[in-house]
Image: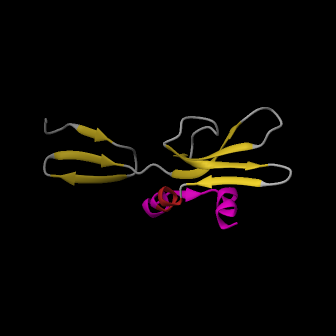
Amino acid sequence: MQPNMRYWLSAQKHLRINEYNVKITFMAVAIRFTKTGRKGERKYRIVVKEKRSKRDGKSIEVLGMYEKREKEIIKKINMDRYNYWISVGAKPTPSVANIIKQ
């Protein structure tokens, strides 16, 4: 590696290590819904994705699914992975937090 080489992992905190400039940033990660299913059907995936990305854009990981029907509510969530992402610093949206509490 060359002395003046910069590594851009994201963009917030700066560290100076020896003669190398290292820039480390932490992306804001959210746990939120993405819409799936046909028009008029309410089916959602619970996913981990960058906060600034589109609702139906690329996700980091799929944690589960949520479907609200007339007679029943179906939810399947991998709570181990959910708790992992919370421990790492991901923040659930208010709607996902309400679903988890139920």
Whether residue 3 appears in magenta in the rendering, the answer is no
Residue 41 point in image, percent of width and height: 80, 39
Residue 96 point in image, percent of width and height: 65, 57
Residue drawn at the location 25% of the way across and 39% of the way down: 6
Vertical arrangement, residue 87 with respect to residue 60, above or below: below
Residue 31 point in image, percent of width and height: 57, 52
Residue drawn at the location 55% of the way across and 58% of the way down: 91
State which quadrant residue 5 falls in.
top left
Vertical arrangement, residue 67 with respect to residue 55, above or below: below
Front in this rendered view, residue 69 or 56? 69
Left or right of residue 62: residue 34: right
Q: Residue furthest front?
A: 71
Q: In which quadrant of the rendered image does the N terminus lie?
A: top left
Whether residue 100 appears in magenta in the rendering, the answer is yes
Range of the magenta residues?
Answer: 84-102
Q: In which quadrant of the rendered image does the C terminus lie?
A: bottom right
Give the main secondary structure of the magenta stretch.
helix
Residue drawn at the location 43% of the way across and 60% of the way down: 88
State which quadrant residue 92 falls in.
bottom right
Front in this rendered view, residue 17 or 39? 39
Q: Residue furthest right?
A: 70
What is the image's colouring? Answer: secondary structure
Left or right of residue 56: residue 79: left
Residue drawn at the location 64% of the way across and 40% of the way down: 55
Vertical arrangement, residue 6 with respect to residue 13, above or below: above
Front in this rendered view, residue 35 or 70? 70
Q: Is residue 50 visible?
A: no
